[in-house]
Image (spheres, helix red, strand yellow):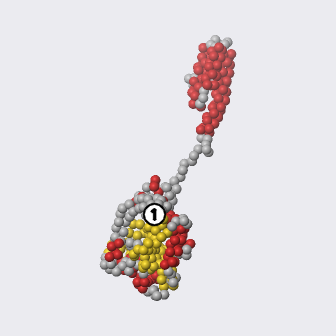
Amino acid sequence: MEEKVLKLLEEAKMALQAAKSLRELDDLRVRYLGKKGEVTALLKGLGNLPPEERPAAGNAVNRARKEIEGLLNSRKILVQEEERSLKVLSETLDISLPGVRRERGHRHPVTQVMEEILDVFAGLGFSVRVGPEVEKDYYNFEALNFPKDHPARDMQDTFFIREDVVLRTHTSPVQVRTMESEEPPLRIVSPGKVYRHDYDVSHSPMFHQVEGFMVDEGVAFSDLKGVLEEFVHQFFGPKVPVRFRASFFPFTEPSAEVDMGCSMCLGKGCRVCKDSGWIEILGSGMIHPEVLRYVGYNSEKFSGFAFGMGMERIAMLRYGIDDIRLLYEGDMRFLEQF
Ligand SMILES: [Zn+2]
C-alpha cells in the first residue's frame, strides 16, 4: 500500500511540475484529489486493509494528499505569475513602431493661390470687397461700357437667369458697385466665382477671378505697370520678366494684356508657352472714362486702372497643372500634392 502511495505521489509531482497552465493544474486537482480522484480512491481502499495496517497506510495517504495539495497551490501561484508576465510581455508598447498616420486636410490649391494673391495686394495697400454672383445685366455689362448688342458681349459666353439677370461673367461688376457707394481714393481687390458657358482643358463653367482697381487723382499707366510688375515679382519671383501687350476691353482704354516669361522653358520656347517664351497671366487697362461717368465720378479729375486674372490659370502656372478639370474632380491623390 505504501509503495502504491509513493508511486502515485511521484507521478503526481511530475505531472504538476509539467503543468503549464491553470487549466492543466485544475485537471490534475480533479484527477488526484477530486471525489473520484486517485488519492480519494486510495483513502476509500483503506477499509479493505487488515486493521493493523490501516493507521500507517492512512497516514501515508494523508501525507501524500497534503503534499499534492501544497505542490498544487505553489504551482498555481507560479503559473499565474508566468501567465501574467507573458500577457504583459505580449502587450508591451513598442515605441519605435511607426504610428498610425492621421489624415489631415488642407486648403484647396485655388484657395491657397487666391489667399497669397490677396496677401500681395494687401501689402500694396489694397483692401477687399466682394459682390453677388447673380448679377444684373447693368453691373455685369452696361455700366462697364458694354452697350446692348455690343459685339464685345460675345467675348463672354453668358449664363442668363432672366433677360436682365445673369451669372456674373467676371468680377468687374464689383468695380462699379464699389465706385457707386464709395469715393476715391480707392485701392480695391475683389476675389470670387464667375461663370461662363465654356468647358475644356483650360476652361471651366465656373472659375475664380481676382479683380483689382485703383482710382485717385492723377493715376497713370505707369502706376498700373508698377503695381502689376511688383505683383508678378512677389508672386512668381523677383527675376521673372514682365511685358505689356496692347489689347481691347470695353471697360478700359488703353487696355493691355500682361505676359510673364515662361517659367517652364525660361523664355526658350516650349509647349506651355506655345514656343513664344511668354505666358499671358492677366488683363488690365486704364478705367474707361465712360465707366467713371456711369458711377458719377468726375473723369476730368479722377483716373484709375483695373486688372483681372483667373485664379485657376495662376494655380496651373505655378504648379504645372495642364488640365483645369483636375482642380474640380476632388481626387485626393491629386489634391494631396499641394
Ligand atoms: Zn515655355
In the image, residue 79 above or below residue 125: above
Residue at screen point 40% across, 83% down: 290
Give the image location of residue 132, x and y in percent. Answer: 42, 74
Q: Quadrant of the N terminus?
A: top right
In the displayed structure image, the side of residue 95 where residue 255 appears, left or right: left
Quadrant of residue 146 within the rendered picture: bottom left
Residue at screen point 61% across, 25% down: 18
Mark yes or no: residue 17 visible.
yes
In the image, residue 60 above or below residue 276: above
Residue situated in front as seen by the camera: 235 or 278 = 278
Residue at screen point 59% across, 30% down: 21
Mark yes or no: residue 272 visible.
no
Q: Hey, what amino acid is under mark 1?
A: Gly
For mark 1, give the secondary structure.
loop
Residue at screen point 43% across, 83% down: 289
Residue annotated with mark 1: 277
Give the image location of residue 333, x and y in percent. Answer: 46, 53
- Asked if ligand 1 lies within 8 A of label 1, the reply is yes
